[in-house]
Image (cartoon, rainbow, N blue to C red):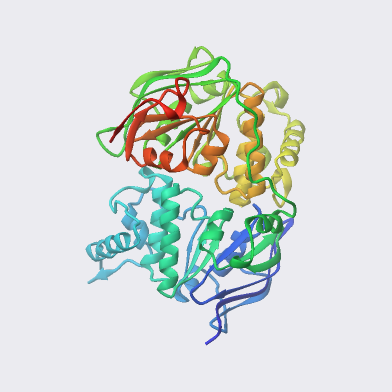
């Protein structure tokens, strides 16, 4: 038997205006976790899409167990026991979790779908791998993190042996990431082989055996993880040394920009409220982080704050103006910008061009409009400036359809649009999701610059490292309530994790003793 279960030899794949993969060779050994690292738009997802049969390469061949194979579509890939968890989920939103998992491979008895048998297998898999889901929940009603679990279960249900994970941790909590890392190790012990696309160097160092680095469509090299460091990997990826620590001065909070009082938001999934009587303030010149494990009300709170959903009680004041019942556009006009959690659902119009997406929040302004007509030259000039400033990479520049861009570059476009609006309040939800270390460095620098120029920033993040390094104050949300307020300089990651997980419940006034004083109780 060949040493390698998969060999991708001299793969070249082109798109209009760009060579996404340029003569790339990648070899996956039996029972290993092989990481694929690279900047946004480096060609990682494209290469894996070639392996999964979604794209056909112009040049190169693929071998499985030493024998050349032709993969024309995902059905061919599944027949070769190759499965893929996609970065942008391939789920039918109006179907249930169970229906999505078994779609295309439904067990049947006498011509009828045997859902009882399918449910039994799904429940067994979810228990075995710690991927708990509600089989009867509708996809459109569950969190992004839960949708990720459904994608993984889809692959496991098909008994795939070669597993492709495309940015699998981008939407997971720190605890869920640790669990997934353990699941991956268990997979390899069972003889499965894993290709793992990620931007997170800590994850690569923790779980991968080897790592292949791509940059601008070319293969920079393959290294053994035991023989390298995070700094060396980041330099290989970006082509320059990267500042991995966030540099910022002490915050100087000023006037109250956002005042949230007693906000309650009903749940769409059950009779309890998703958000319960939440109150806090964000001042100009500070970054306040709303932290918590996914599914504890942060998403519903942000929806109510930004006008995407209604709340049942409470009030929201922005710059002294009551915006509780204001429309989304009027909230934007009042001084709120929003980097959403789900870039496809709420961040972009995928069939619009990049330049059209970059002016979605501003096209009605005089700068971009003459009477009823859009000033296309001004839109193009504006888009080109943001593309340069935020290093948004796309095959056809400003006229690239947003749908065809990599996930990381789609995220860069949203971040660029919302930060450049210069709104008094920036609501940033998972702003670095799916970004490489170079882009994360840039986003963090821009968030701190927003703060330092007198703006207020409300950061909603699942990344504990980001929460600790970027925030000036941390509010922990658990089961829809604010259970703690922390000074990041006076709290440990372990203590923060306990409150996020509900192991403790507390309220601490940072202004009165910080994280060293206050009342606390066991939950």
Of residues 332 and 476, the one nearer the viewer is 476
Residue 108 placement, left or right of 180? left
Residue 174 to residue 192: above or below: above
Q: Is residue 247 visible?
A: yes
Q: Is residue 363 visible?
A: no
Of residues 80 and 368, the one nearer the viewer is 80
x and y, in percent, of residue 390 in the image? 70, 40
x and y, in percent, of residue 306 in the image? 48, 27
**Residue at screen point 55% across, 72% down:** 72
The quarter of the rendered structure image containing the C terminus is top left
Residue 384 placement, left or right of 421? right
**Residue at screen point 77% across, 34% down:** 381
Residue 444 to residue 40: above or below: above
**Residue at screen point 41% across, 39% down:** 495
**Residue at screen point 58% across, 50% down:** 407
Residue 137 to residue 56: above or below: above
x and y, in percent, of residue 293 in the image? 40, 42
Q: Residue furthest bottom?
A: 1
Asked which quadrant contains residue 233, the reply is bottom right
Residue 365 to residue 72: above or below: above
x and y, in percent, of residue 143 in the image? 40, 44
Of residues 468 and 417, the one nearer the viewer is 468
């Amino acid at each position: 038997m060949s040493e390698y279960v998969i060999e991708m030899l001299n793969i070249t794949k082109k798109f209009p205006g760009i060579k996404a993969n340029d003569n790339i060779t990648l070899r996956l050994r039996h029972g290993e976790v092989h990481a694929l690292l690279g900047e946004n738009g480096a060609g990682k997802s494209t290469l894996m899409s070639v392996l999964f049969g979604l794209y056909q390469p112009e040049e190169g061949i693929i071998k499985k167990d030493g024998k050349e194979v032709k993969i024309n579509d995902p059905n061919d890939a599944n027949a070769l026991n190759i499965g893929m968890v996609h970065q942008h989920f391939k789920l039918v939103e109006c179907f249930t979790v169970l229906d999505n998992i078994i779609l295309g491979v439904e067990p049947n008895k006498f011509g009828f779908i045997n859902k009882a048998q399918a449910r039994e297998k799904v429940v067994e898999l979810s228990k075995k791998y710690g991927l708990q889901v509600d089989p009867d929940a509708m996809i459109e009603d569950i969190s992004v993190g839960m949708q990720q679990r459904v994608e993984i279960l889809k692959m496991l249900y098909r008994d795939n042996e070669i597993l492709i994970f495309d940015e699998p941790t981008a939407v997971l909590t720190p605890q869920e990431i640790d669990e997934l890392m353990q699941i991956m190790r268990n997979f390899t012990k069972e003889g499965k082989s894993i290709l793992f696309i990620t931007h997170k160097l800590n994850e690569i160092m923790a779980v991968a055996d080897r790592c292949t680095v791509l940059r601008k469509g070319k293969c920079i090299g393959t290294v053994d993880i035991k023989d390298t460091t995070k700094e060396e990997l980041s330099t290989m990826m970006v082509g320059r040394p990267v500042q991995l620590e966030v540099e910022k001065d002490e915050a100087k909070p000023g006037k109250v920009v956002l005042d949230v009082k007693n906000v309650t938001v009903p749940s769409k999934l059950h009779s309890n409220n998703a958000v319960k009587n939440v109150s806090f303030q964000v001042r100009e010149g500070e970054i306040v982080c709303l932290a918590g494990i996914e599914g504890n009300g942060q998403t519903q709170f942000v929806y109510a704050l930004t006008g995407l959903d209604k709340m049942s009680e409470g009030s929201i004041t922005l710059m002294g103006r009551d915006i509780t019942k204001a429309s989304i556009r009027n909230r934007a006009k009042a001084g709120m910008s929003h980097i959403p959690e789900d870039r496809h659902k709420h961040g972009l119009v995928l069939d619009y061009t990049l330049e059209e997406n970059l002016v979605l929040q501003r096209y009605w302004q005089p700068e971009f409009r003459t009477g009823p007509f859009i000033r296309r030259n001004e839109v193009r000039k504006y888009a080109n400036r943001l593309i340069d400033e935020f290093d948004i990479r796309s095959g056809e520049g400003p006229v690239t359809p947003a749908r065809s861009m990599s996930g990381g570059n789609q995220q860069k476009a949203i971040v660029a649009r919302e930060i450049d609006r210069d709104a008094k309040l920036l609501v940033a939800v998972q702003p670095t999701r799916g970004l490489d270390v170079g882009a994360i460095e840039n986003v963090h620098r821009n968030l701190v610059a927003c703060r330092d120029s007198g703006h207020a920033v409300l950061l909603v993040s699942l990344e504990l490292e980001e929460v600790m390094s970027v925030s000036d104050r941390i509010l922990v949300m658990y089961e829809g309530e604010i259970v703690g307020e922390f000074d990041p300089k006076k709290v440990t990651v372990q203590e923060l994790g306990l409150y996020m997980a509900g192991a403790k419940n507390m309220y601490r006034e940072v202004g009165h003793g910080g994280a060293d004083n206050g009342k606390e109780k066991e939950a």
